[in-house]
Image: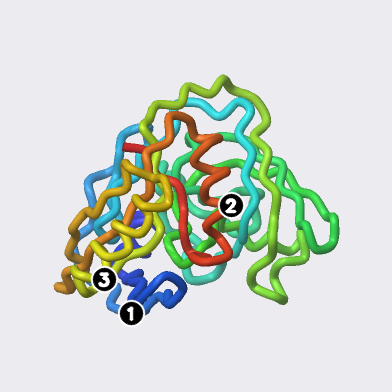
Amino acid sequence: MTRATWWGFLVVFLLVGGCGGGRYLPSWSPGGAPPPKGAGGTGRPYTVMGQTYYPLQTAEGFEEVGVASWYGPDFHGKRTANGEIYDMYQMTAAHRILPMNTRLLVTNLDNGRTAEVRVNDRGPFVGNRILDLSYRAAQILGAVGPGTVRVHLRALGGPIEFQGPFYVQYGAFTLQENAYRLRDRLIARGYPGTRVTEGVVGGVRFWRVQVGTFPSVAQAQAARERFLAESPDCFVIAD
């Protein structure tokens, strides 16, 4: 079972209430059948917690700022999303959409430390985190103690071929009327492509509010930055 799918079983991410009332609800039940071999490990779309992700084909010029976490003993020796055996002492990381084997220069924005890692896994799928570091990479960056740190990511090599349209997932609601009420407010704010999509996770039905549309990932990332103050868990997706 890949690490990405473990998180699919282990964590149910629900944002409930109004604009800023977000939280995630963990559901610790690691059972279930393993996914098809290589799920999430190639450039093919994959689905976790009812959300489908569309990996980028290449990563040249990719930069991102956000929160990084780390993972270690619980996954040491298990398979990563690309089929490798996870070694928490190697310089690797998990990202939701970057191509496998992308090399990333990661900078801890709190202390200035840097580390180069290779993407070999999918995740993280919790809150507003953008990267899961191996234990060794987290040690070098000074992230083991605090658990999460603010980072800047820069891809090292490979041409980007972005395909859209892109959306910013603002939040998800267990009450359908709350989702549509928020969608209407966002449309009134100048985002006419904003939509509501429906999903079921762990037997719970919810409605995702996705702001759009944006023709490029750069424009979607800029919009995400604007939304962070009101929706800290928002993130960019491609359609």
User: Which residue is depicted at the point 54% across and 70% down?
Assistant: 73
Secondary structure of the residue carrying numbered label 1: loop
Name the disc covering residue 225, or none. Answer: 2
- Camera-near label (2 vs 1) is 2
Quarter holding the N terminus?
Answer: bottom left
User: Which residue is depicted at the point 47% across and 22% down?
Assistant: 161
Label 3: which residue?
178
Residue type at mark 2 is Glu
Secondary structure of the residue carrying numbered label 2: helix
- Camera-near label (1 vs 3) is 3
Q: Is residue 68 above or below residue 236?
A: below
| Tally of marks | 3
Among numbered discs 1 and 3, the one appearing first in the sequence: 1
How crowded pointer 2 is (Cα within 10 Å; few <14, some 14-19, many 20+) is rated as some
Left or right of 32 on screen, residue 63: right
What is the quadrant of residue 213 in the picture?
Answer: top left
Label 1: which residue?
28
Among numbered discs 2 and 3, the one appearing first in the sequence: 3
Label 2–label 3 contact, CB within 8 A? no
Among numbered discs 2 and 1, the one appearing first in the sequence: 1
Q: Nearer the viewer, residue 217 or 41?
A: 217
